[in-house]
Amino acid sequence: RMEIIEKIVDFEKYCKYCKHKNDPEYTEPCKFCLDTPVNNNSERPIYFEPTDEFKKKDKVQKERKRLESRSRLKRINTM
């Protein structure tokens, strides 16, 4: 059974990469995101829709983490 951890939404990090970033704050879906400052197991806003720029950035970060993990495993195996 997975434990649910409520995390504070990081609007500063995600809103600038959301497709709705230029929408007025009082319209949907921005209004609902801003009215929900906490999310289960995630710091992403509930209606966050990533821009292509964010998708590329996220993909690069995931690949970097994968390569770092792989490198650490190699070092451990050679000891």
Image (cartoon, rainbow, N blue to C red):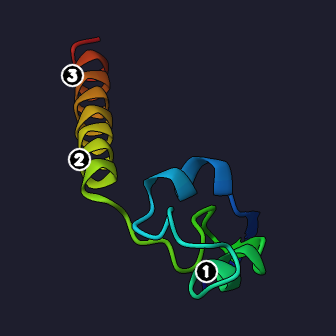
Residue under label 3: 74
Amino acid on which the number 1 mark rests in the picture? Met
Name which residue type carries label 2: Lys
Picture quadrant of residue 52: bottom left
Above or below: residue 6 compared with residue 14: below
Q: Is residue 28 above or below residue 20?
A: below
What residue sits 30% from the left and 42% below the top?
A: 57
Which amino acid type corresponds to the residue marked 3 in the rendered image?
Lys
Residue reaching furthest to the top? 79
Judging depth in this view, the residue of 12 and 72 nearest the camera is 12
Quadrant where the image shows the N terminus: bottom right
In the rendered structure, which disc, 3 or 2, sits on the residue that comes first in sequence?
Answer: 2
Which residue is at 32% across, 60% downward? 51
Residue 15 in the image: x percent, y percent? 56, 58
Residue 76 is situated, as x and y percent measured from the top left of the image, at 31, 21
Quick one: label 3 or label 1, which is nearer the N terminus? 1
Q: Is residue 44 left or right of residue 70?
A: right
Q: Which mark is residue 56?
A: 2
- Which residue is at 70% across, 63% downward? 9
**Residue bearing mark 1:** 2
